Amino acid sequence: MDRFIANRITIDLDAVRHNVRFLRSLLPVHTRFTAAVKADAYGHGAVPVARAVLEAGAWGLAVATAEEAAELRDAGVEAPVLVMGPVYTEGQLVEMAGRDIEVSVVSPEMVRLLQKASKSLPALRIHIKLDTGMNRQGLLPGPEVEALMDVVRSAPSITMAGIMTHFACSSEEPDSVGWQLERFRPGVERVRREWPQVPAHAANSAATMHHPESYFDMVRCGIAV
């Protein structure tokens, strides 16, 4: 029997561009806009959505995995790309460095992997991801962050490119943003004592629309895009 597909999803990239322009209009001039295109851009098609958001003025892109970042580079996307989730192997770290893809350090295991791989890495830009309350990924303020800073100090190939966190429930519990920011700001201050110009970023879609105090130097919007 012939197979008939009865369902179709039509993606309006003009609507995606409009959403990016609207979200950017909320931001101060100095605040970068990064579009999260993880999970195939939430099922909308990572490569076409990436191109659309960049056309609309997005500064960069964020994904969840090294494989997603490689897909964008394979498609010819040259904008800044940040991997927000874990990178699992030395080979992945080397590939991300060689393809000018930035990575978030999200666990003590990744700190140890970076330390092991540092001698074989070309230039790699990293972001510290602090766990300020989501309890899913991120280094805890204190010894875990200090251990990563030790690695960066001793590895000329590794550059501190950012410090970030993620809000656990900014849309469902708006008050939670405040107490997560209270935990985030001291971490930013600690890192900037040694790397004063390091960008900080925290705001997701809901925070971008409702919590301007969370903008810092960059916002990361996914679902609102």
Image (cartoon, rainbow, N blue to C red):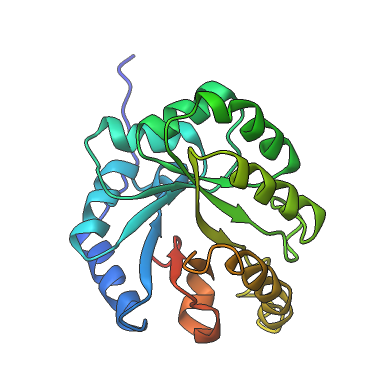
Q: Residue at x 51, y 84 (%)?
A: 210
Residue shown at the point (66%, 78%) measured from the top left: 177
Q: Does residue 12 show up?
A: no
On the image, the x and y values in percent for residue 191 come to 62, 64
Image coordinates for residue 118, horizontal then vertical, percent: 57, 31
Judging depth in this view, the residue of 161 and 78 nearest the camera is 161
The C terminus appears in which quarter of the rendering?
A: bottom left
**In this image, 218 relative to 134: left or right?**
left
User: Is 6 placed left or right of 36 in the picture?
Assistant: left
Q: Which picture quadrant has residue 98?
A: top left
Residue 59, image x and y in percent? 30, 61
* Side of 3 where 132 appears, left or right: right
Please determine whether, in this image, residue 39 is positioned above or below residue 196. Answer: above
Q: Nearer the viewer, residue 110 or 214?
A: 110
Q: Quadrant of the N terminus?
A: top left
Q: What residue is shown at x 48% (from left), y 29% (from top)?
A: 121
